[in-house]
Image: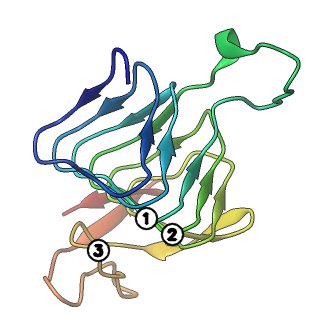
């Protein structure tokens, strides 16, 4: 954990490994069996489900030192990553997005997107509180309303 920073009120489950120079924001929850490698940054209030995986090199080989080739992965505020999801390095996961359990993220994820599958595809939109938005882009639980601006979801 040399050079790493973990924000206030963050919690780490059993068998969590934090690599060198990792940044973890405030209020994050990292569940059991997660390794957060150098090159990964978690913003505030990120949830990492059990056994989710972050990679940090695109083309690893045991006999080739690629530490200078780490690709940065950024998980923005409030995003949730489901159990056993795999995050391929070099992507940005948008604020408040929801990554389904077992999904494989190979490309950037828009804020508030619900992603599922291998490779993951957008299957809907989610509110700040984690509820799936209805066809009018409204949260059925909180009444929070959104609109699409050139495929970017924004709060009204």
Q: Earlier in the sequence, mark 3 or mark 2?
A: 2
Circle on res. 104:
none
Q: Quadrant of residue 13?
A: bottom left
Tell me the element at label 1.
loop
**Residue found at x 47% / y 52%:** 110
Relative to 60, does residue 20 appear above or below in the rendering?
above
Residue sitting at x 74%, y 67%:
118
Give how far apart the Cα atoms at labels 1 and 3 are: 14 Å
Rounded to the nearest angstrom, the CA distance separating label 3 from label 2 is: 16 Å
Say if mark 1 contacts mark 3, CB within 8 Å: no
Q: Is residue 133 left or right of residue 107?
A: left
Dot 1 or dot 2, earlier in sequence = 1
Please report contact status of discs 3 and 2: CB closer than 8 Å, yes or no: no
Q: Which residue is mark 2?
A: 83
Q: Front-most of 123 and 23?
A: 23
Q: Position of residue 49 (x, y in %)?
A: 43, 64
Query: Answer yes or no: do the residues labelled 1 and 2 have beta carbons within 8 Å?
Result: yes
Residue corresponding to mark 1:
49
Q: Residues within 10 Å of mark 2 (few under 14, many from 20)?
A: many
Read off the residue under disc 3. Answer: 130
Image quadrant holding the N terminus, namely top left
**What SS does tag 2 mark?**
loop
* Quadrant into which the C terminus falls: bottom left
Residue 91 position (above or below residue 110): above
**Residue 146, percent across and down?**
27, 68
Residue 39 versus residue 132: which sits nearer the camera?
Answer: 39
In this image, 149 relative to 107: left or right?
Answer: left
Q: Residue at x 17, y 50 (%)?
A: 27
């Amino acid at each position: 954990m040399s050079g790493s920073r973990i924000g206030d009120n963050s919690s780490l489950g059993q068998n969590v490994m934090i690599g060198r120079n990792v940044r973890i924001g405030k209020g994050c929850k990292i569940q059991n069996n997660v390794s957060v490698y150098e090159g990964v940054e978690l913003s505030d209030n990120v949830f990492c489900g059990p056994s989710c995986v972050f990679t940090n090199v695109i083309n690893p080989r045991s006999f080739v030192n690629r530490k200078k080739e780490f690709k940065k992965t950024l998980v923005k505020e409030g995003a949730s990553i489901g159990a056993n999801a795999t995050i391929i390095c070099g992507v940005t996961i948008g604020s408040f997005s929801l990554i389904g359990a077992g999904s494989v993220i190979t490309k950037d994820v828009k804020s508030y997107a619900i992603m599922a599958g291998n490779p993951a595809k957008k299957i809907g939109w989610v509110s700040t509180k984690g509820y799936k938005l209805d066809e009018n882009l409204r949260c059925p639980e909180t009444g929070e309303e959104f609109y699409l601006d050139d495929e970017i979801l924004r709060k009204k």
